[in-house]
Amino acid sequence: MLGSTLIRAPPPDPAKSVIENVLELTPLTSVAPTLPRHGNLTRSRELWHPPGARGVYGGAVIAQCLSAAQQSIPPPSPSNGHAVFLIHSMHCYFVLAGDSTIPIIYYVERVRDGKSFITRTVQARQKGKCIFTTTLSFVREGSAGKATIDHGWTMSEDAVAKLNAALEEQDTANDADAEALGVQGSGPFESIQLPIENSRSKRVSLREDFDLIAPSADTSPDIQTKKTRQWIKARGRISSTDEPQFHLSALAYMSDSYFIGTVALVHNLWRLSSSGNRREKAKTNKDPLAKMEEEENSDADQGRPRASIGMMVSLDHTIYFHRPREIKADEWMLSENESPWSGDGRGLVFQRIWNRNGVLVATCVQEVSEILS
C-alpha cells in the first residue's frame, strides 16, 4: 500500500513477531540517498490501530520515535570505551491528529552526545507539519557505579494468580470467548483485564460458562484511589537480537493502550458519546464492552442517564524506563493505572508497569483532554 507509506510495503517477515513488523522503519536514504543516514526515517508498513479508533494509534508513533532515536545512538566501540547507552526517559507531546492514510516522516536531531547521557529530539511529520514531538534521554549503562539507592512500588499480591486463572480459562475457550475475557483476538499485542481495585464491583455475565468483572454504579467515594489493571504482552515471540532496544520500543507501543480510558472508567462514565451505537451492539452479544456499559448504566442513579464522554484526546505522554534489561515485552507485564486528579477538562493518569517477576520496569504519565457530551 503506497498511500500510507513512501515505499511499497514489504511482505510481513514470518520469522518476526507482529509488533516487529508493524514498527519497522525505513531510512529515507533508500528513497533519497543524500539525506543523513540517522536523521530521517519513515514507517515501512501501514500502521495497525485499534478497532473503531480514528487516525493514528499514539503508541505506534511513540514507539517509532523511540526506535528512530535508538538508531542514532553510537554503538559500543573503542572510541567510546565500549559504552552502551539505553533509554531512561522520553517526554512526548501530541501536537496534531495523525492521518493513517498518509506517510509519517521521523526527523531525529542529535542534541547532545555526552559521556554519561545522550539527548535526542524526534519529530513525526505529515505533509510538512509536526504531529508529534518527543525529547529522549539515554544513559550510559553502569555510569552510576556499583553502589546505588534502590526502592520501587511493589506489585499487587493477587495479580499473578489472577493472570494464571485467566490464562487457564483462555486455554479452554474458543477465539470469541477469549476476546470476551479481555484477550484481544488480533493486533500486535494482547491483554487480560483484571477487576478495578478499590471499587465495589459486580460480575457481568458474558456467557453461561464464564463471566467478567465490571465496576458497578455504587463505587468507592475516593475516585483517586481506584486502579485499573491489565496484563499485556506483545503477540508471539520477539525475534530481534538487538536487545533490549526492540523490547523497549514494544513497551512504549503498548504503554499508550489503556491510558486514555482510565478517567472515564474510575468515574464510571460512558466512554464515548456514541455509546448508543455500542448499546445496539450489546443486544447481539458481540461487543463485551458494550454489554458491560449497558448493565452498568441500568443501575446508575436509580435509572437516570449517566454523563458520557464526548471527546477524549491524549495531550502528552512520558515514560521512565527503570530497568531496561529486565523488560521482555513478549512476556506478560502488569500495567496498573490510576488518576490522582481530573478537572478543567483534563485528567492526569499514572501508570506503573511490572514484569512477571514483580520488578517495576517502567513508570508512565499522561494527561488527557476529556469533554463531556
Image (cartoon, rainbow, N blue to C red):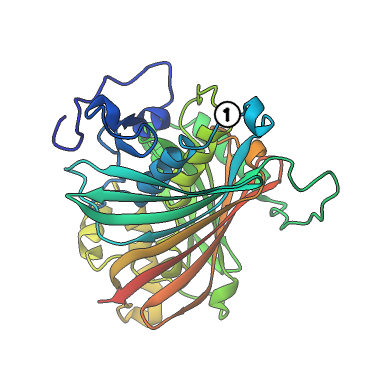
Quarter of the picture holding the N terminus:
top left
Residue 52 in sight here? no
Q: Looking at the image, which is closer to me, 328 or 271?
A: 328
Disc 1: which residue: 243
Three-letter residue code for mark 1: Glu
Q: Looking at the image, which is closer to me, 328 or 67?
A: 67
Q: Where is residue 200 in the image (x, y as percent from the top left)?
A: 56, 69
Residue 238 in sight here? yes
Q: Position of residue 129 (x, y in %)?
A: 22, 55
- Work out whether 338 lies above or below 190: below
Q: Is residue 44 left or right of residue 154?
A: left
User: Looking at this rendering, what residue extends furthest in the left direction?
Assistant: 3
Q: Position of residue 169 (x, y in %)?
A: 53, 36
Please report the residue visible at 54 percent of the width from the left and 34 percent of the height from the top.
74
Q: In this view, does 70 lie to the left or right of 314?
A: right
Please report the residue visible at 21 percent of the width from the left and 41 percent of the height from the top.
103
User: Looking at this rendering, what residue extends furthest in the front direction?
Assistant: 79
Q: Position of residue 180 (x, y in %)?
A: 40, 44
Crowd band around label 1 with a 10 angstrom C-alpha radius: few (<14), some (14–19), many (20+): some
Numbered disc 1: secondary structure: loop
Please report the residue visible at 32 percent of the width from the left and 82 percent of the height from the top.
304
- Work out whether 316 lies above or below 355: below
- Work out whether 67 lies above or below 89: above
Q: Looking at the image, which is closer to me, 179 or 65?
A: 65
Quarter of the picture holding the C terminus:
bottom left
